Amino acid sequence: MKVAVVGLGVEGINAVESLLNHGYEVYASDINENINLKQDKNLEIDLGFHNFNKIEKADAVVLSPSLWNTKVFQKFRSDKKILSDIVTDHRPLFTIGVTGTNGKTTTTMMIYDILKKAGLKILTGGNAGGGFKGYTEVILEAASADYDMLLVEVCDMTLDFCQNAFNFDLIVVTNIGRDHLEFHKSFENYTESLKKFVMGKTIVLNPKNEEFGRLIEKTSKVNYFTEIPYKIDLFGKYNLENAAAAAKTAEILEIPEKIVKTSLKEFIVLPGRSASIELPSSRIVIGKTDNADATAAVLDEVEFPVIILGTPRKGEICRFDIFREVSKTNSKIIAIFPGLDNTQEEARNILEEENYNGEIFNLSDVDDVVKFALKCSEKYPNVFIGGNGQRKIIEITNSLKKAISAK
């Protein structure tokens, strides 16, 4: 069987790798000529253009989520040539989707751990940009083994794509905030897409988004969560909300409360997510906070005299609101390092426009960030490292722990 993968962003590249690993022949294409794919005897690549003749001759097509609603590729959807319409072993499984602006991966893995402890065999995966192997891997893996349930993290930019690819029985919406507005064009467009995504489903929703709940209560069965009433080994009230979302999901699935509580109390934070590193006289909080809402949630916990942030990509205008958010704080120092892109000048300009009156530092790389954070921790009680660039945040976390243990 030969599959055409059209669009080679993070999701498309992961799809190619998954298909090859599962023994498929692949034709891959992208209009971008600067794509790096490992050569393989079962892989044919066209860069700079799409060869529609080759796509049409393929037995199935994987469309990049970014191309899902473009008119030129509608033919493959209407002809039922999309991979998820041909390889369908995942469709009969009871399927849980976890979406929202922040906390998706943590909540997904909390649910997974609860269900696993309950003795269920769970297939988990989703958004390649969020750290999973991508949606194609989920579909192919479902065909290769027996599972009791399917658990999928759904990025807000892939709602339409996932609505077609999976049959969701239960949808968890962690929260609704402002991110990826360059893609959605407006916050209203995002909420409208989300409304269509959850229509007719049983959903688990944060009461902070009660207005959205009222909009959909006639078309969906809404269950609200707040915070769990016991301590867990994770930083921040927002993680108590993530845990409550997982607990409410487990309640709907009739998982015994004892299993739920044990799982959440033992849950270990995932790499790149908010973690607190305790030092003799101070604390460094570190984690991916790639939009203003996520950043505000961390900054609401304690006062951070020092804030160190990774920068977004050039085109991600709404993510620069992170720097507007931190400019409102009483922090004495804001340091900036290249996160997803080296946009330090743009970030500095925003801080200056917002009349931030603390000190601004530019940091060059991971080593620089680690040394600066440790130096600041000798003087200040709380240091925060966040912003954009999950891989870099993980690298900084590992380097920090290594440097601290070496002291």
Image (tube, helix red, strand yellow):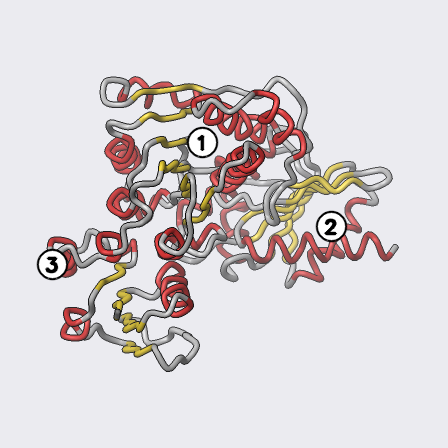
Mark 3 element type: helix
Q: Mark 3–mark 2 contact, CB under 8 Å?
A: no
Q: Nearer the viewer, mark 3 or mark 2?
A: 3
Residue located 29% across and 64% down the image:
7
Q: Using a 10 Å C-alpha cutoff, classify the residue at mark 3 as few (fewer than 14 neighbours), some (14 to 19) or many (20 or more).
A: few
Mark 1 element type: loop
Amino acid type shown at disc 1: Thr
**Lower sequence index among marks 1 and 2:** 1
In the displayed structure, does residue 301 sit left or right of residue 314?
right
Amino acid type shown at disc 2: Ala
- Residue at the spot of label 1: 174
**Lower sequence index among marks 3 and 1:** 3
Residue located 31% across and 20% down the image:
221
Point out residue 247 in the picture as x, y percentages from the top left corner: 52, 25
- Residue at the spot of label 2: 373
How far apart are the alpha carbons under marks 3 and 1?
34 Å
- Residue at the spot of label 3: 75
Q: Residue furthest front?
A: 146
In this view of the protein, which residue sits in the foreground, 117 or 379? Answer: 117
In this view of the protein, which residue sits in the foreground, 299 or 143? Answer: 143
Q: Using a 10 Å C-alpha cutoff, classify the residue at mark 2 as few (fewer than 14 neighbours), some (14 to 19) or many (20 or more).
A: many
Amino acid type shown at disc 3: Lys
Q: Using a 10 Å C-alpha cutoff, classify the residue at mark 1 as few (fewer than 14 neighbours), some (14 to 19) or many (20 or more).
A: many
Point out residue 351 in the picture as x, y percentages from the top left corner: 54, 45
In the rendered image, which quarter contains the N terminus? bottom left
How far apart are the alpha carbons under marks 3 and 2?
53 Å
In the displayed structure, does residue 347 sit left or right of residue 397?
left
Residue located 37% across and 70% down the image:
23
